[in-house]
Amino acid sequence: MPIFIIARLTIREAQRRRLLWVALFMGVAFLLVFGIAFHYIQLDLERQPTMEDQTSFVSVFLLTAGLYAVNLLVNVVAVLVSVTTLSGEIESHTIDAIVTKPIPRWQVVVGKWLGFAALVLAYLALLVSGLMLIVYLRSGFYMDNIGQGVLLMALAALLVLTVSIAGGTRLSTIANGVLTFMLFGLAFLGGLLEQVGALIRNQAAVNVGIVSSLIMPADALWKKAVAYFQPSGNSNPFELGPFAAITEPSSLMVVYALLYLTGLILFALWSFSRRDL
């Protein structure tokens, strides 16, 4: 089918531009740094008469911090690999070689989305699996609800990816990149304000965070994922510091994120189909 051919060509193009290889190299470097740091921290704990609960807490804290970094890296990679996919090809007229073929334009968008989605999800799986393997082999700790949390991280990454692709159907490459990163930054700032507002019981700050989550729900999905990462017996989420979810977003936010993603995809299909090339 043309969709899968375009998806395959999209993956090959990402490889040809070497951006994918750079991201892969930096991901391996990140895992190496995390592994070395975790090894020496665990070694120090083993030399001290620490309690088992304290050792488990250190593992939870460091693994959650690592997952936080992975969430950031994957979202940045989702933007960088896709920001030029339509806007850049339109500006350079290389898209003409595709749209002049008897292929509906919506298939071009879906094919590119599937190709980039496969790359982003594979990158997420690689980094998360690496973190989990490092922690498990060194300390024997395993996070029970990792699956649910990673699914939410994957949904957040797909949201950022889809914003980038949808923006590329109407905006220039630079404008599209600025828009996508600003929306991601807005979501992060709003999530931070919501957590601070919940901490100091300021409803206005909480409301600002909720509105920003409606504009871009990526950070709310991360907060929902953190709620799964936190130990079930932990009654004090503040112990995890900046990685804690003081207020857990409701399940309705996940439903909203799915509708948000669907709406973005439909907009991208409609916008590209009607753009004058």
Image (cartoon, rainbow, N blue to C red):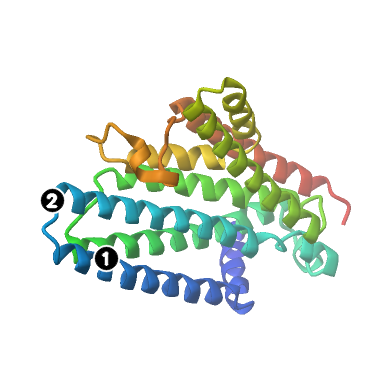
Disc 1 residue crowd, few under 14, some 14–19, many 20+, Cα 10 Å: some
Decide: is 37 above or below 203. below
Residue at the limit of the structure toward the right, as seen here: 276
Decide: is 246 above or below 186. above
Q: Which residue is mark 1?
A: 41
Where's residue 51, x and y in %? 13, 51
Q: Which residue is mark 2?
A: 51
Distance from Cα at disc 1 to Cα at disc 2: 15 Å
Tag 1 and tag 2, C-beta contact below 8 Å: no
Where's residue 73, x and y in %? 52, 60
What amino acid is found at the position of numbered circle 1 in the picture? Ile
Disc 2 residue crowd, few under 14, some 14–19, many 20+, Cα 10 Å: few
Tell me the element at label 1.
Answer: helix
Nearer-the-camera pick, 72 or 264: 72
Examine the image and state in which quarter residue 229 appears. Answer: top left
Relative to 64, 164 lies left or right: right
Where's residue 37, x and y in %? 33, 69
Relative to 40, 65 lies left or right: right
Nearer-the-camera pick, 156 or 169: 156
**Quadrant of the drawing holding the N terminus:** bottom right
Q: Tell which circle, 1 or 2, labels the residue nearer the N-terminal end.
A: 1
What amino acid is found at the position of numbered circle 2 in the picture? Met
The dot on residue 2 is none
- The residue depicted at 64 percent of the width and 77 percent of the height is 17
